[in-house]
Amino acid sequence: MARGQLKKITEALLTQGYERVDDQQWQLPAWRQRKLLMEARSPHRVDCVFREDQVWPWPGK
């Protein structure tokens, strides 16, 4: 009985677009694609920290 239920759950997940990573993990292809894109973009991250020494000095300062 438990194996039958497991098979039904597996079929339902596969029809919804999930992919099996291993025996205990399921993953949506969109999450995998997002992870790949984030890893590819990581060297090009913008540093948004304000550092006073990187701006032109104000007149009279």
Image (spheres, rainbow, N blue to C red):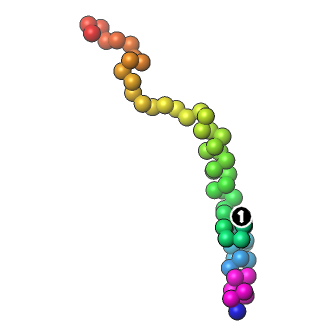
Which x, y percent locates residue 56?
38, 13
Q: Main secondary structure of the magenta part?
A: helix
Q: Is residue 14 visible?
A: yes
**What amino acid does circle 1 point to?**
Val
Name the element at disc 1. Answer: loop
Residue at 49 percent across and 31 percent down: it is: 47
Residue pointed to by mark 1 = 21
In the picture as drawn, the residue positioned furthest to the top comes out as 60
Q: Is residue 17 visible?
A: no
Q: Is residue 47 above or below residue 11?
A: above
Q: Is residue 7 above or below residue 39?
A: below
Q: Report the quarter where the N terminus lies.
A: bottom right
Which x, y percent locates residue 22?
72, 66
Q: Quadrant of residue 51?
A: top left
Q: Is residue 14 above or below residue 6?
A: above
Give the side of residue 44 with respect to residue 5, left or right.
left
Numbered range of the magenta stretch: 2-7
As for residue 56 lying within the magenta part, the answer is: no
Badge 1: how crowded within 10 Å, few (<14), some, or many (20+)? few
Residue at 71 percent across and 64 percent down: it is: 21
Residue at 42 percent across and 18 percent down: it is: 54
Q: Report the quarter where the C terminus lies.
A: top left
